[in-house]
Amino acid sequence: MRSVLRSRAGERGQTVIEFALLAPVIILFIFIIVDFGIAMDRRIVLQHAVREGARMAAVNDDIAQVCDHTVAEAASIITWADITFSYEDLDEPPNLRATDAGDSVKVKASFAYEFPILREVFSAFGGGPLSVDMTPSGTARLELSVPGETECP
């Protein structure tokens, strides 16, 4: 009877040691999944913001209002400096003085997301920061003509 109790006590100790060895790996894996989820959320918010900016630009020729709207929709992820705004003249030959209704307007934003949890892990092992460059864009058809605006490259 005593030998059975001793062997079970040894197994309990083994389980605690195995858990102590695996717990940090499991916790790190969970943090990485959460970090990746946050990055995906940032990407979706940013894509929504540029799409809304393009929709507003289709009916509004004031670039400042469009950029303000895009920044507001992005929930303070980006600033004015991160937004690229351009018109695409689809006329043949291109009309250099105006962009007509039916042409495209394109709003693009750039944002680099650094994974905070992975940055700490990689820096502990001597690695550099890990980041993902996000450059979503939104395009809409103009509903009014815009005189002499910038064309898309």
Image: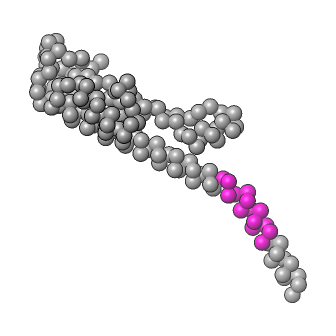
Q: Which residues are magenta?
A: 12-25
State the image coordinates of residue 11 (x, y, percent, origin top left).
Answer: 79, 72
Q: Is residue 114 above or below residue 62?
A: below
Asked whether residue 94 is in view, the answer is no
State the image coordinates of residue 13 (x, y, percent, origin top left).
Answer: 80, 68
Residue beneath the point at 11% across and 23% down: 145
Given residues 19 and 114, the one toward you in this image is 114
Instruction: Judge left or right: residue 35 versus residue 46.
Output: right
Q: Is residue 128 above or below residue 9?
A: above
**Quadrant in which residue 69 is drawn:** top left
Residue beneath the point at 35% across and 38% down: 74
Q: Is residue 144 above or below residue 114?
A: above
Quarter occupied by the N terminus: bottom right
Asked whether residue 57 is in view, the answer is yes
Residue 14 shown in magenta: yes
Prevailing secondary structure of the magenta residues: helix
Quarter occupied by the C terminus: top left
Residue beneath the point at 75% across and 67% down: 15
Q: Is residue 63 above or below residue 42?
A: above
Given residues 25 and 59, the one toward you in this image is 59
Given residues 61 and 41, the one toward you in this image is 61
